[in-house]
Image (tube, rainbow, N blue to C red):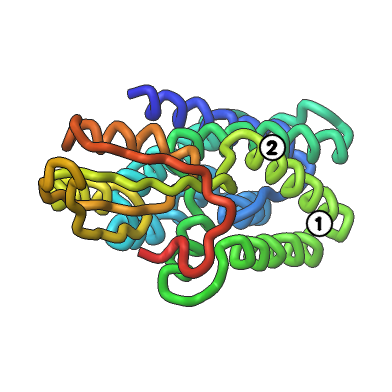
Amino acid sequence: MYNILLITLGSVLVALAYNLFLIPHLILSSGLSGIAIMLGIITPLNTGVLNFLLNLPLLILGYLKLGRRFISFTILSVVVISVSLYIIPVYGVSSEPILSSLFGGVISGIGIGIIFRASGSSGGFDIIAMLLAKKRDFPLGTLLSVMNAIVVIVSGFRFGWDAALYTLISIYAAGKVIDTIHSNHIKLTLMIVTKKGDEVKERLLANLYRGITVMDGEGAYSGERSKVLMTVITRYQLTDVKAMIKEVDPQAFVNITETTEVMGMFHKE
C-alpha cells in the first residue's frame, strides 16, 4: 500500500509538471511521454489519452517479458499520469520558457524519482530499453540517451530549435533530480543462504527483473545442505527484496554488500 501511494503521488507530480510548465511553452519531456506531449499539441487529442495509448502495447509486452511486480507498478503509474494529464488543465504558471523548462524538469524528476523508489517506472522508453537490453548487448543508458536525442531533434524540427534547447534543459534537470532521489546507479550484491532455495528463487524471479545464480552449499559446522542464491540489484529494490525473502524463509541468511562495478549483462535475465 505504501508503494502504491508513493507511485500515485509521483505520477500526479509528473502530470503537474507537464501541464503547468512544459506543455504551455511547447517543451517536451523525455521518453514516450515527450512524444505524447508533441502529438497532443499538434492534434486535437488529449495528451493523457495519447500517453495511455502509446504505452498500452509496451505495458502488455512488458507484463509478459519483464518482472510482474515491476510492470504492475508501472501500469499504475501510466494510468495515474494519463488520467491526471486529462483532468489537470493546461495553464502556464510562468511566462518565461527557461524557468518553465527548469522547474518542469525538476518537478517531473522528483515525481519519476519517487516512482522509481517505489519499484516502478513511468513507462515508455524505460520498457523499450529494458526489452532491447534483454535481447541485445547494449547498455540501458546508451539506449535511453539515443531515444531521448530523437525526441529533442524532432522537437527542433517541429517547434523550432529554441524549443528543442528548452526540452534539453528540462530532460537534463529531470535526469539530475532522478539520480539524486532513487540512487539507481548504486548496485548491491546479495548472497542468500536458504533451505528453501527453489521457493526463494521462484518468488524473486516472478517479481524482480534480475538474474539469479544458484549454488549448492553446506554448513561447515552442521553439515546441513542448503542453497546459495547470488544476485545483483539496485539500492531502491532492496526493501522489496528483503520483504520477499523474509516472507518465504524468515530463517534465511542474507549477506548484502555494495558493488563497485558490474560487467556483463546486468539487466539480462
Dot 2 alpha-carbon crowd within 10 angstroms: few under 14, some 14 to 19, many 20 or more: some
Q: Which mark is residue 177?
A: 2
Would residue 194 be visible to someone looking at this image? yes
Q: In which quarter of the image is residue 97?
A: top right
Q: Identify the residue shown where x is 87% and y is 60%.
A: 161
Q: In which quarter of the image is the N terminus?
A: top left
Amino acid type, residue under disc 2 in the picture: Val
Q: Position of residue 73 (x, y in %)?
A: 37, 40
Task: Report which residue position mark 1 lands on.
Answer: 164
Q: Residue at x 82, y 28 (%)?
A: 94
Residue 245 spot, x, y in % from top left:
25, 37
User: Alpha-carbon distance for marks 1 and 2?
Assistant: 20 Å
Crowding near pointer 1: few (<14 within 10 Å), some, many (20+)?
A: many
Dot 1 amino acid type: Ala
- Asked which quadrant contains residue 105, the reply is top right
Is residue 47 at least partly visible in the picture?
no
**Which element type, helix, strand or loop, lies under badge 2?**
helix
Q: Quadrant of residue 102?
A: top right
Q: Is residue 245 above or below residue 230?
A: above
Look at discs 1 and 2 and give the one toward the viewer. Answer: 2
Horizontal side of 248 relative to 27 (left or right) equals: left
Q: Position of residue 259 (x, y in %)?
A: 53, 49
